[in-house]
Image: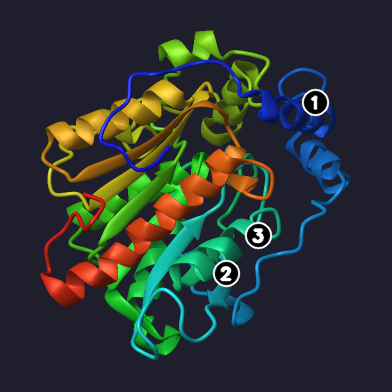
């Protein structure tokens, strides 16, 4: 399925995805059930077999630390630079993507999403800065948000050093990372922060109240479960956290006008499907240019498997097109929305 403005189809898992979903579920910790400790969950994931596919080739990779928010530790980041040539013109400044990994604000890291970040760098010809924000429950909300916004500010201020165009800055992430990308886009608007050209939200968590119909329809059997989602939320917010806070649930923000053009990827067999689509609808109603790539037969996590799933390859191509469009807009017209808008 290519980029589309809307789609109402929500169906069950594609046959080619079922073996992958079952294999993933077999090695994933029983979060909120037999496994309630975040450190144990991370140990289980670390012991899981590595993906057998070679990592996408990029021009250069650098691990470094950047300043954290006031009073907080430095933030580890991994910077990916593309090979020469590719999707953008020669040695001109590249688009730049600040990428936030998923994992319910509790698990995953730079390594778990290394292949995804490399793929974005290669396919869009973009500089990608992947952010190792603080995780819960050791650092609960708003630590991840503060780190994410500090990283965006740093990238915007160091775009020249990175070989990137500060006016072609995209914030992107999957799942909890999509949540952080949406939230920092709102913060940047509200605090007169960096100008963000695009927000790319891959099956984002946008409403921590978790009341959408897809939580019931896709509660179990499609890798990510409703029980997992509840456990992640509890780790992130703690017992006294507010799931309706707009920096937790960006869908509940009072005003969505004036936000960057958005591209939203959703999967029909995902508990987060409805809230991701609802956020796209709300953005569009507020006058924000929005495109959607909806894959009715896919599951939460499919974006990470382009080697196995045609829908994942299409979703990646759609996202790369959106990132590249931020440069084309700047060169040709300066309008927001791009060729995908």
User: Does residue 184 appear in the picture of this structure?
Assistant: yes
Q: Earlier in the sequence, mark 3 or mark 2?
A: 2
Judged from the image, the secondary structure of the residue bearing numbered disc 2 is strand
Judged from the image, the secondary structure of the residue bearing numbered disc 3 is helix
Q: On the image, numbered disc 3 is attached to which residue?
A: 115
**Cα gap from disc 1 to disc 2, whole angstroms:** 29 Å
Judged from the image, the secondary structure of the residue bearing numbered disc 1 is loop
Would you place residue 119 above or below residue 47 in this image? below
Badge 1 density bin: few <14, some 14–19, many ≥20, Cα 10 Å: some
Dot 1 and dot 2 residues touching (CB under 8 Å):
no
As drawn, the label of residue 77 is 2
The residue located at (47%, 15%) in the rendering is 214
x and y percentages locating residue 290 in the rendered image: 24, 42
Q: Earlier in the sequence, mark 1 or mark 2?
A: 1
x and y percentages locating residue 7 in the rendered image: 32, 25
Q: Is residue 172 left or right of residue 43?
A: left
Q: On the image, numbered disc 1 is attached to which residue?
A: 35
């Amino acid at each position: 399925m290519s980029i589309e403005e809307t789609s109402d189809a929500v169906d069950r898992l594609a046959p080619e995805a079922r073996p992958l979903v079952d294999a993933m579920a077999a090695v994933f910790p029983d979060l909120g059930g037999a496994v309630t400790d975040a450190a144990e969950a991370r140990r289980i994931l670390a012991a899981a077999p590595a993906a057998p596919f070679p990592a996408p080739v990029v021009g250069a990779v650098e691990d470094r630390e950047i300043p954290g928010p006031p009073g907080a530790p430095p933030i580890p980041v991994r910077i990916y630079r593309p090979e020469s040539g590719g999707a953008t013109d020669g040695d001109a400044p590249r688009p730049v993507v600040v990428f936030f990994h998923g994992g319910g604000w509790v698990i995953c890291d730079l390594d778990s999403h290394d292949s995804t970040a490399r793929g974005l760098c290669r396919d869009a010809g973009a500089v990608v800065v992947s952010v190792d924000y603080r995780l819960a429950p050791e650092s609960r909300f708003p630590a991840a948000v503060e780190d994410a916004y500090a990283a965006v500010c740093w990238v915007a201020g160091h775009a020249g050093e990175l070989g990137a165009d500060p006016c072609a800055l995209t914030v992107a992430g999957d799942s909890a990372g999509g949540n952080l990308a949406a939230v920092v886009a709102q913060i940047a608007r509200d605090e007169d922060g960096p100008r963000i050209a695009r927000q790319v939200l891959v099956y984002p968590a946008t409403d921590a109240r978790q009341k959408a119909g897809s939580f019931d329809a896709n509660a179990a059997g499609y890798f990510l479960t409703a029980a997992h989602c509840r456990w992640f939320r509890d780790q992130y917010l703690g017992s006294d956290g507010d799931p309706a806070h707009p920096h937790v649930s960006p869908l509940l923000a009072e005003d969505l006008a004036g936000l960057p053009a958005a591209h939203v990827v959703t999967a029909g067999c995902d508990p987060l499907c409805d809230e991701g689509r609802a956020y796209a609808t709300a953005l569009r109603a507020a006058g924000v240019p929005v495109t959607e790539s909806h894959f009715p037969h896919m599951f939460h996590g499919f974006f990470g498997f382009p080697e196995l799933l045609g829908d994942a390859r299409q979703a990646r191509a759609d996202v790369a097109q959106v990132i590249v469009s931020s440069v084309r807009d700047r060169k040709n017209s300066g309008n927001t929305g791009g060729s995908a808008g």
